[in-house]
């Protein structure tokens, strides 16, 4: 493990290892806060960025994770239909409280609790993808099929 990793990035690295995956978290000099920033910093297409977005189920108040293809916009109505419950945007406090991470660096794994997860089917089109690793500068490269396995996500159309 890189000694230069922040505590949040180390948590993601340890989670990858505990799940049996040999991917490495890397820290980039440029921000990866948005999908466009991440693609530019990595040198890949925006579509290869797996962005983790936390929503709030409005009745149960549970967190919902949607891992979306970088260029796709999540249709909240579609996610609400999958859940049979309306969802709304989560604020920064809700995200941190339920994941242990701040917006702009939320990874698809390593959260402080189990979170119901949906994965954008468009991510499966790519040979490799990149996901946030706990900070706005940390990422890891992985195979889309492995992302499905490590998150137990339901693969759906999110648009």
Image (tube, rainbow, N blue to C red):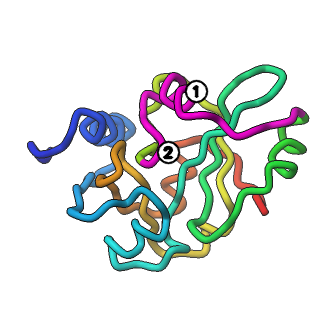
Disc 1 on helix, strand or loop? helix
Task: Choose between 53 and 2: the one closer to the eye.
Answer: 53
Question: Any magenta on residue 93?
Answer: yes
Residue depicted at 49% across the width and 45% down the height: 108
Q: Name the spot of residue 118 as percent of width and height, x first.
A: 68, 47
Disc 2 on helix, strand or loop? loop
Task: Choose between 20 and 67: the one closer to the eye.
Answer: 67
Question: Any magenta on residue 70?
Answer: no
Q: Which residue is mark 2?
A: 108
| Label ID, residue 94 | 1
Snapshot quadrant of residue 47 = bottom right
| Quadrant placement of the C terminus | bottom right
Query: Would you say 36 lies left or right of 139 here?
Result: right
Residue 117 to residue 140: above or below: above
Residue depicted at 76% across the width and 30% down the height: 57
User: From mark 2 to mark 1, how far is it between C-alphas?
Assistant: 16 Å
Segment colored magenta: 85-104
Residue depicted at 51% across the width and 22% down the height: 97
Q: Name the spot of residue 43 as percent of width and height, x first.
A: 34, 79
Q: Nearer the viewer, mark 2 or mark 1?
A: 1
């Amino acid at each position: 493990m890189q000694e230069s990793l922040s505590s949040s990035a180390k948590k993601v690295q340890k989670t990858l290892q505990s799940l049996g995956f040999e991917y490495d978290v890397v820290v980039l000099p440029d921000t990866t806060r948005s999908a466009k920033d991440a693609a530019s910093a990595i040198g890949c297409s925006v579509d290869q960025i797996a962005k983790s977005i936390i929503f709030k189920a409005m009745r149960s108040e549970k967190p919902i994770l949607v891992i979306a293809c970088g260029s796709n916009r999540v249709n909240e109505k579609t996610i609400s239909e999958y859940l049979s419950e309306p969802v709304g945007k989560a604020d920064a406090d809700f995200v941190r409280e339920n994941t242990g991470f701040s917006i702009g660096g939320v990874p698809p794994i390593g959260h402080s609790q189990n979170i119901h997860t949906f994965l954008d089917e468009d991510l499966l089109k790519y040979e490799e993808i990149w996901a946030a690793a706990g900070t706005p500068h940390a990422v890891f490269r992985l195979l889309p099929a492995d992302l499905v396995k490590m998150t137990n996500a339901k693969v759906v159309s999110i648009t």
